[in-house]
Image (cartoon, grey):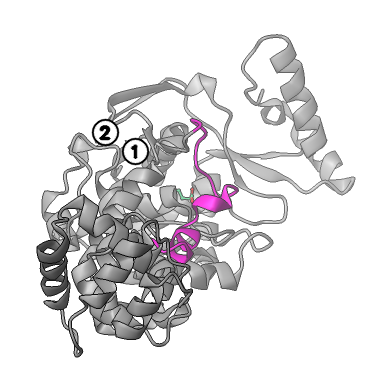
Amino acid sequence: MALRFAPSPSGHLHVGNLRTALVNWLCARKEGKPFILRLDDTDRERSSEAFADAIDEDLRWLGLDWDQRVRQSDRLARYAKAFETLKALGRVYPCYETPEELSLRRRALLTAGKPPVYDRAALKLSAGERAGLEAAGRQPYWRFQLEPGVVEWDDGIHGTIRIDVGTLSDPVLVRADGAPLYTLSSTVDDINLNITRIIRGDDHVTNTAPQIQLFRALGAGVPAFAHLGLLHGPGGEPLSKSLGSESGRDLRAMGIEAQALASYLATVGTSDPVRLAPMGELTEAFDIGRHNAAPATFDRVVLEGLNAQVVHALSYNEVRAKLYVAGLPHATEAFWLAVRANCTKVRDAVEWWPVVAGPVDPLVDDAAFAAEAAALLPPAPWSDTTWKAWSDAITAKTGRKGKALFQPLRRALTARDHGPEMRALLPLIGPDRTRARLAGTRA
Ligand code: GLU
């Protein structure tokens, strides 16, 4: 009894893949079942070690761990054995068409307004014709012969799904060079690794019917399936690896925090509101039945809102290394605590650094008022009570209060209309810079 996430190491994980991984992990942890990371790397040309390492790194970053990690390239003997079983059962047959011939036939069917289903021409070849083709150098590839009829399953998200197998081509299980293809290797592994529940994207719904027939042909029980509505980009396009802009690592490089992304991906496309929660709570709340069959839009603005909530609560120790990398080696705890509420991402702190460390080109609209305020500055040392003492003194002297008092001071000291609390900023700016800026000098 286990769940699995089965990426192909042929690219970086995009947010849709991360969501599938997370949902399987949450389900496994909630049900107390093992979670297996399976690398679908039988396509040696498209798979790489670097992508495999990146998958581990991205999953760990998101907060996921696994009980077992397997690679399909280590399990070829198992696929070969299952293939022999299928051959003995007469459920696979050799085919000889070239990709060009297949594509010509497909196009002809489409032109005639028919579904482009493989016509099983190879099934009609006589032994002699097959021998002739092989003598002429054609190596067979092998298809699984689907049984006619309707395959039905109770999908954890869609409810009952029925697929008429007559609308599908017999899937290729083994290529002419002997390499097993996904339908075979995935099913064999799901059997061998005792996968009892498969949660994956909607794009796999039509694969499920042949896979169910294959589970049965190999004498195995059929796992429970659940197909998640896909995540779409803002323009309605499905997210895919080719849309590198939505890869998990790009989001990370842009300053998205793991907790924000995990919370977002656990709740987007469900009947629950998107909310920030620790992994434990997300696990507790997990319920596959709350996931929608309809596509969900990946909304960066909502994600950034969650990210801001995470960032506002990060301690100095948690961000120290990030501030360093962002180019702020001298950022202090007081600085971080002053600015974090104004940051959506940790690196937004960079914008505020010149306010405390200079230089700032002050915005002084009323020089006389600024000079009057400068004369009332309390003596050093300054603390977070200095701002109140100073503004009280200004009110007492000038009668100004509220916005008429704070706005000109904020503009002079920070060159902005909005920002972190002046109470926290003032002692960080310090007396020298404060005086210079009130006098209209860049400091
Ligand atoms: N390697 C397949 C994919 O990434 C796995 C699909 C599945 O979960 O069965 O699409």
Helix or strand or loop: what does disc 2 sit on?
Answer: loop
Q: Residues within 10 Å of mark 2 (few under 14, many from 20)?
A: many
> How far apart in space, not on screen, are marks 1 and 2 (Cα)?
7 Å
Give me the residue at 52% from left, 69% from top.
52
Which residue lies most toward the bottom here?
Answer: 381
Q: Earlier in the sequence, mark 1 or mark 2?
A: 2
* Residue type, mark 1 in image: Leu
Please name the residue that numbered disc 2 is placed on. 157
Q: Quadrant of the C terminus?
A: bottom left
Q: Is residue 279 left or right of residue 233?
A: left
Residue 281 drawn at (x, y percent):
12, 57
Residue 213 figure quarter: top left
* Residue type, mark 2 in image: Ile
Q: Is residue 75 visible?
A: yes
Residue closer to the observer: 110 or 147 = 110
Residue 435 drawn at (x, y percent):
34, 78
Is residue 143 on the magenta stretch? no
Q: Is residue 257 visible?
A: no
Mark on residue 228? 1
Residue closer to the observer: 350 or 390 = 390
The magenta segment: 235-256
Helix or strand or loop: what does disc 1 sit on?
Answer: strand
